[in-house]
Amino acid sequence: MSSKILYITRRAEFAASHRLKVTGWDDNANSIAFGKCANLHNHGHTYTIELTVAGTPDETTGMLMDLTELKKLIQEHIINHVDHKNLNEDVPWLQGINPTAENLCVEFWKRIQPYMPAHVRLYKIKIWETENNAAAYKGE
Ligand code: NI
C-alpha cells in the first residue's frame, strides 16, 4: 500500500483595497514602515492566493483531492468575503488586524482549515500582494 505524501496547489485571485497601519502610530511612522501601502486613502491590489494541501492520493484515481472541490472551498470561505472589499473596514473577521499579506495568510488559514476534507491536510497558504511580493504560512 502506498503512503506517499503529495501536494496539490490551487490558485485564486481577488481584488481588494487596504491601508497598512499600526494603530497608535502617526502617519509618518506608518509611512516609514509600510511605504505606499500606508497611503491615507487606501489603494488596491490584485492578490493571488496559492493554497496547498497535502495527503496520500487515492490508489484508484491517483488523485489527492478534487480540485473543483478545493476551488469551491476557497471561493466560499475566502474569496466571497474579501473580493472587492476594503480589508480594513468591510470584513468582520479582519477587524482590528493590519491587513498585511502575512496577517491575511494566518486569517485565511483559520477560515478555511476547518473545512478541509478529512483525508487531506492544509499544508500552506501563500498570498502574492504584487507579482514580486508574497507571504506564506504553514500553520503553527
Ligand atoms: Ni498595499
Image: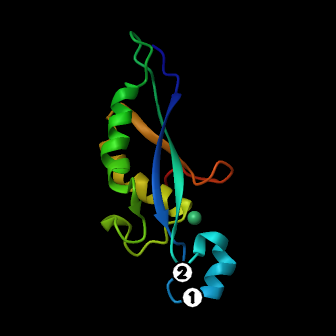
Residue wearing tag 2: 22
Which quadrant would residue 76 be assigned to in this image? top left
- Residue 54: percent from the left, percent from the top? 48, 33
Q: Give the vertical position of 11 relative to 47 (above or below).
A: above
**Image quadrant where residue 107 sits:** bottom left
State yes or no: discs 1 and 2 in contact (Cβ < 8 Å). Answer: yes
Residue nearest the observer in this picture, 21 or 126: 21
Cα distance in 3D space between marks 1 and 2: 6 Å
The kind of residue on which mark 1 rests is Trp
Q: Image check: 5 left or right of 115?
A: right
User: How many marks on residues?
Assistant: 2
Question: What residue is pinned by disc 1?
Answer: 25
Q: Looking at the picture, does residue 103 appear above or below residue 35? A: above
**Residue shown at the point (32%, 48%) measured from the top left:** 77
Where disc 1 sits, the SS reads: loop
When the figure is inspected, residue 46 is found, relative to residue 21, above or below; the finding is above
